[in-house]
Image (cartoon, grey):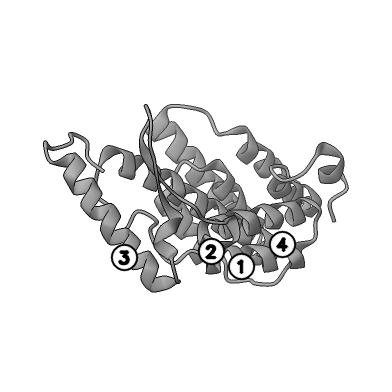
Amino acid sequence: MWDSPPASARANLRTQIARTRTLLNQVEPDGGQRLETRRGPEASYQLRINADELDFYRFRYSSMRGRQSLGQCDYSQAITELTQALTYWSGSLTEGLPPTKWCRSAGAGLHAEYLRVKQDLIAAELLGHTRRALDFDIENLLHEEPSNTDTWVILAAARFFNQGPIKALDVIRDCRSMFTDEYGIELPEPVSVMQKAVLDQDEGLVRRCILQKYESPRLVHSAP
């Protein structure tokens, strides 16, 4: 709760615990009893909650099932599960919490999970041919994580399928420019493979470039 706890930290914490128990009692009868006081050398408080009562666990479970379906090339089921996962995300999980180092770090990690699910959903929609206007969503992901190789691969694939190889090569050129100019490194290997697929106009390889992060080598090789 604090980077540097104030002298009144213990008293403040007890006050907040009492308020939380009051709120829990308003949600369900005796709900305050869920917030237990654990005594002993490592005294603490513990909130008893089932996994299916917490949206974040539902989010993780649905996103995991969506990735499994994507790895099995079941794009319809993947879209269903990943879309369901995003319905459980109603905003920043650290909203309203103090801006401590721990909260900022945890918030960044959780937000990265959210972006991965959005990326997975776009991949499923692209491979399942359920949506054609994906560029805007993919570019938004790149705006948040410009060095994410998987997103560059998906954007190149979307341009390849929707606008042709020349537009896909424009994406790869932009990717090379960014990595070379800003990071001083060569084009990442997954993007290099995508470049070969585009130059060869090999639709199967383009699809496998997207699927490689989700599937075993055997499944990737046989992906439809």
Q: Which mark is residue 78?
A: 4
Q: Is label 3 or label 1 in front?
A: 3
Q: Which mark is residue 212?
A: none
| Mark 1: amino acid | Thr
Image coords of residue 127 (percent x, y): 72, 61
Residue 75 or 5: which is nearer the viewer? 5
Cα distance between the residues tagged 4 and 2: 20 Å
Cα distance between the residues tagged 3 and 1: 35 Å
Residue occupying the point 18% across, 40% down: 9
The residue that mark 2 highlights is 135
Q: Secondary structure at mark 2?
A: helix
**Sequence order check, earlier mark of 1 and 2:** 1
Residue 61 or 29: which is nearer the viewer? 29
Cα distance between the residues tagged 4 and 1: 8 Å
- Asked if the residues shown at circle 4 and circle 2 are in contact, with their CB atoms under 8 angstroms apart, the answer is no
Image coords of residue 173 (percent x, y): 52, 44
For label 2, count other residues whose C-alpha is less than 10 Å away and answer few (under 14), some (14-19) or many (20+): some
**Sequence order check, earlier mark of 3 and 4:** 3
**Sequence order check, earlier mark of 4 and 1:** 4
Q: Quadrant of residue 125?
A: bottom right
- Asked whether residue 167 is in view, the answer is no
**Sequence order check, earlier mark of 3 and 1:** 3
Q: Secondary structure at mark 1?
A: helix
Residue 178 or 5: which is nearer the viewer? 5
The residue that mark 1 highlights is 83
**Sequence order check, earlier mark of 4 and 2:** 4
Asked if residue 85 lies left or right of residue 177, the reply is right
- Asked whether residue 130 is in view, the answer is yes
Cα distance between the residues tagged 1 and 2: 18 Å
Residue occupying the point 71% across, 46% down: 214
| Mark 3: amino acid | Thr
